[in-house]
Amino acid sequence: MLARKSHLAFWLLSVSLMGPASVYLSGCAVGPNFHKPVAPNVTGYTPAPVSGTSSAPNVPAGEAQHFAEGADIAGDWWALFHSQPLNDLVERSLEANPDIKAAQAALAVARENVLAQRGAYYPNVSAGFAATRAKTSNQIAPVPNENVFLYGLYTPQVSVSFVPDVFGLNRRTVESLGAQAQAARFALVATHITLSSNVVAAAIEEASLRAQIDDTRELISINTDMLEVLRTQFEKGYASRLDVAAQESQLAQVAATLPPLVKQLAEQRDLLAALSGGFPSQDLPEKFELSGFQLPAEIPLSLPSQLVEQRPDVRQAEENLHSASAQIGVAIANRLPNLTLTADAGSMSLAFSHLFGAGTGFWDLGANVSQTVFDAGTLSHRERAAKAAYTQATEQYRSTVLTAFENVADTLHALDQDAEALKTAAAALNAAKVTLDLTRQQTQAGYVNYLALLSAEQTYRQALLNLSIAETNRFADTAALFQALGGGWWHRADLPQN
C-alpha cells in the first residue's frame, strides 16, 4: 500500500510538471519582439575626411598623429603614452576604486534577479507537516471515524503549484530583467572606461601644473629682478615713479597666478589618491612630468559602424530599449487570463505511528483560471505607459548615439587644432629664444641694459609656459579620443564579455 501511495505522489508530480510544460511550449509570448537597432548610415565623423594632424619639429609632443581607420583599440590604451608610473596608477585604480566594486555588485544584483525570475518556469513544490490536538463538543457528532471527542491529528503532505506561461508573461519578464542585467554590465564597462580616462587626464593635468608652476616661479623671479633694477634706477633718477609702479603691478599680477596653480596641483593629487582608492593623506608614489609622456603617433580610429558596438553608453541605452520592449509584453500579458494548476498528496492519521498506513492517504488536483473583468482602466493604462516608455527609450537611444558621434568629432577637431596651436606656440618660443640670445649678446657688448635682458627672459618664460599648455592639450585630447571610441574594453580580461 505504501508503494502504491508513492506511485500516486509521483504521478501527481509528473502531471504538474509535464502538463504545464506542454502548455508553455504551445503558448506564445505576446508583445513586440525586440530587434537590435541598425547602425547609423554614415561613413565618417566630420564633414571632411581626417587622416592626421600637422607636426611641430624639434618640439616635445610635436609629432604628427596619424589616424588608422578601422584599427582596433588596445584594452590598455594608456600604455601608448609610454609612462610606467601612469600604467601602474591606472591598473591600481581599476583594482581598488570603490565605484568599480559598486558597479560589479550592481551587476551581480541584476544577474541574481534574472535567475530568481527564471524560477517561475518551474513548479513550486513545498512539503509540510501539521500536528494538532483538539476536543469536539459533546453536543455535536464526533469528527473522527473512531467517534472520539478528544483526538490528535497528524498531516504530512506535499503541495505542487504551477503557473503555465501561456501568454509569455514570465518570458517577457525574464527578457526584461535579462536586458537590465546587460545594461548593468555595460554600466560597469562605462565606469571602467571613465575611471581609466579620469586617471590619465588627472595625471596629465598634474604634469602640466608642475610645468606651469615652475615657469610661473621663474617669471616671478624675473619680474622681481626687474623691479629691483627699476627701483635702483628710480633712486638715481634714471626711471620715473610711474615705471616702478607699473612693474610693481606686473609683479603682483604674475605672483597672483601662482597660488591658484599650487591649489590645483594639490587638488589633482587628492583626486588621483581618491581615484586609486586611497585617502589624500596617503601621498602617491607616482609624480608626473610632461617629459615623462610620449605622444601616441598612430591612433586607431574606429569605423562609424563600429562605434555603436564599442561605446558602453550606447550599448546600455540599447539594453534599456530592449527592456522597455519586453515590458510592453508584460503589460499585455497581465490583461489576459491567468491559469494556475495545483496538486496535493499526503497522509492523515489520528496516531503518528499510523501515518502512511492503509486508508490514510489523500490527494487532490486543481486548476484555476482568473480574468480581470473590471479595474477602472488600470491595466490598459499600464500598457499605454509601457508603450510610451518604449518611445522614450527609443529617443534616449538615438540621443546617446548622436552624443557618441559628437564626442568623437569634437576630439578629432580638438586634436587638429591642438597640433596647430602647438606649432604656433613652438614658433613663438623659437622667436623668444632668438630674441633672448641676441639680447644677451648685446648686454655683454654694452648696447642694451640689464632691464632689456630681463624683459627678453620674461617673454621667453611666458612662451615656455604657453608651449607646455599646448603640449598638455595634445596629451589630454588624445586620451579623450580613446575614451570617445570606447576604450578597448572588449580586450579586458577583468571585464565580463557576456
Image: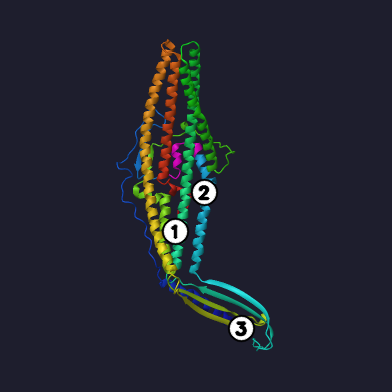
Number of other residues with Cα within 10 Å of mark 3, as a class: few under 14, some 14 to 19, many 20 or more: some
**Which numbered disc flags the more N-terminal residue, 2 or 3?**
2
Query: Residue sitting at 54 percent across and 42 percent down?
Result: 274
Query: Which tag is nearer the camera, tag 1 or tag 3?
Result: 1
Residue shown at the point (36%, 60%) measured from the top left: 35
Q: Distance between the residues labelled 2 and 3?
A: 60 Å
- Name the quarter where the C terminus is drawn: bottom left
SS at mark 1 in the image: helix
Mark closer to the chain start, 1 or 3: 1
Q: Position of residue 142 (x, y in %)?
A: 66, 88
SS label for mark 3: loop
Magenta stretch bounds: 73-86
| Rendered location of residue 400, percent (x, y) | 39, 50
Residue 280 locus on image (x, y percent): 57, 39
Residue 323 percent across, percent down from the top left: 43, 60
- As helix, strand or loop, the secondary structure at mark 2 comes to helix
Q: Mark 1 points at which residue?
A: 179
Q: Residues within 10 Å of mark 1 (few under 14, many from 20)?
A: many
Residue 48 placement, left or right of 363:
left
Proximity of marks 1 and 3: CB atoms separated by less than 8 Å: no
Q: What residue type is labelled 3?
A: Thr
Residue 28 as seen in the image, left or right of residue 342: left
Quarter in which the N terminus is drawn: bottom right
Q: Quadrant of residue 346?
A: bottom right
**Which residue is drawn at the image coordinates 50% and 62% (left, top)?**
115
Residue at 44% across / 25% down in the picture? 462
Tell me the tag on residue 100. Answer: 2
| Mark number, residue 360 | 3
Q: Which of marks 2 and 3 is in front?
A: 2
Check disc 2 and give the amino acid type. Ile
